[in-house]
Amino acid sequence: MMTFEKMYSMGHEEVVFFQDKTCGLKAIIAIHDTTLGPALGGTRMWPYASEEEALIDVLRLSRGMTYKASVAGLNLGGGKAVIIGDPKKDKSEALFRAFGRLVESLNGRYITAEDVNISVDDIDHIFTETNFVTGVALHHGGSGNPAPYTALGVFRGIEASCAKVYGNRSVKGRTVAIQGVGSVGFELSKLLHEAGASIVFTDISEKGIERMKEAIPSAKFVSGQEIFTTTADIYSPCALGASINDETIGMLKCKIVAGAANNQLKEDRHGQMLKERGILYAPDYLINAGGLMNVSIEFEGWSDTKSKRMVDTIFDTTLKVFNISDEQGIPVNKAADVLAEKRLESLRNIKSNYLGRSNTHRMPGQKRRF
Ligand code: NAD
């Protein structure tokens, strides 16, 4: 893979590769775009089959964060980090502290948080070495686990999708097929269940399956393949990306795709394919921005009420994106990009009028330093 070529074509500002032999850390941090502010995005730990796979993942995820922050109206840029390793075997205090020092060395251009396989405890170790971290434990003055807020945002996105498709935002009596009942999928299941929806789910983790069965006995477990063919109102991908692809689109028996996973469409063209099949897609980075909104107010003083108020705005923004899609006759994923790019472009223009000013070392919520 030609890294510079890829960075250029995807618009990345910076990609940092780092290793520490003493603790086995191998990490990549990608900073996509800091037009709106410092790049904030979680760290993912995954046993990637190759370095190339890890690099592609971090490049795609960090670009998604730029768009996510823009659509969410946040003053944050897009960044993401991946740690190459097996979360079951390779985690240690030393590894996360070494990673914390790497984040610190970027002096605020990148701020980290939780993502797949990174817990609040791991974040605590990172916090020992750097202040450029969010999703810090509540008892350390942070906002804790962002997953419940991400789940609330996805729930609002599902409500907006129901309003569009069924003329009523309520999920009562609807069936939701959830792929992945981890941190976000589990919280989302609880919200849906409380609101009167029926749940069908799949997961590859025995522990996760058992937790669901205990918390929501009426939820029906199906195999990894059956989750696509189940008759449901909504398919909700809450595991990893690319579950909407050439193979799965034809299998779907639902009216709506709305979930938490990043990069749900394997390729952009799959948004058009969903449209052609009459399936409404609630764009991933739009409706899964709740966790980002939640951590974004950590530096200025976090509160649960303030956070939930922000997350609730996802309902209206989702409807706005559906309208853009209708008005311009474009797939919904493109409509979300239009909204994100409009804001980025308007601020890029302002930035170029103030040559020399850098807002990348300012924490969100802090006053400007000039
Ligand atoms: P998680 O690791 O807690 O949960 C993922 C779950 O998916 C796990 O239970 C795992 O066993 C399951 N899974 C993995 N592969 C699967 C497969 N092939 N079939 C079925 N289940 C499978 O992660 P999470 O924090 O819940 O995040 C889920 C998704 O949402 C990720 O794509 C993440 O990037 C995205 N997301 C998370 C947040 C957040 O606040 N945690 C915010 C925005 C986006």
Image: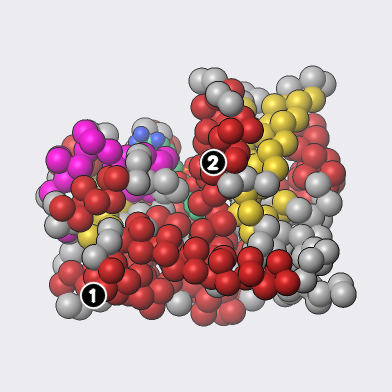
- How far across and how far down the image is residue 241, in percent? 40, 41
Instruction: Work out whether residue 46 can be spotted.
Output: no
Quadrant showing the N terminus: top right
- How far across and how far down the image is residue 210, in percent? 36, 41
Residue extending farthest to the right is 370
Quadrant showing the C terminus: bottom right
Q: Which residue is mark 2?
A: 9
Q: Which residue is mark 1?
A: 163
The magenta stretch is 237-255
Q: Disc 1 on helix, strand or loop?
A: helix
Tell me which residue sits at (79%, 55%) in the image: 108
Q: Disc 2 on helix, strand or loop?
A: helix
Instruction: Answer left or right for 368 relative to 310.
Output: right
Q: Nearer the viewer, residue 118 or 237?
A: 237
The crowding category of the residue bearing disc 1, from other C-alpha atoms within 10 Å (few below 14, some 14 to 19, many at least 20), is some
- How far across and how far down the image is residue 344, in percent? 57, 65
Q: Nearer the viewer, residue 356 or 78?
A: 356
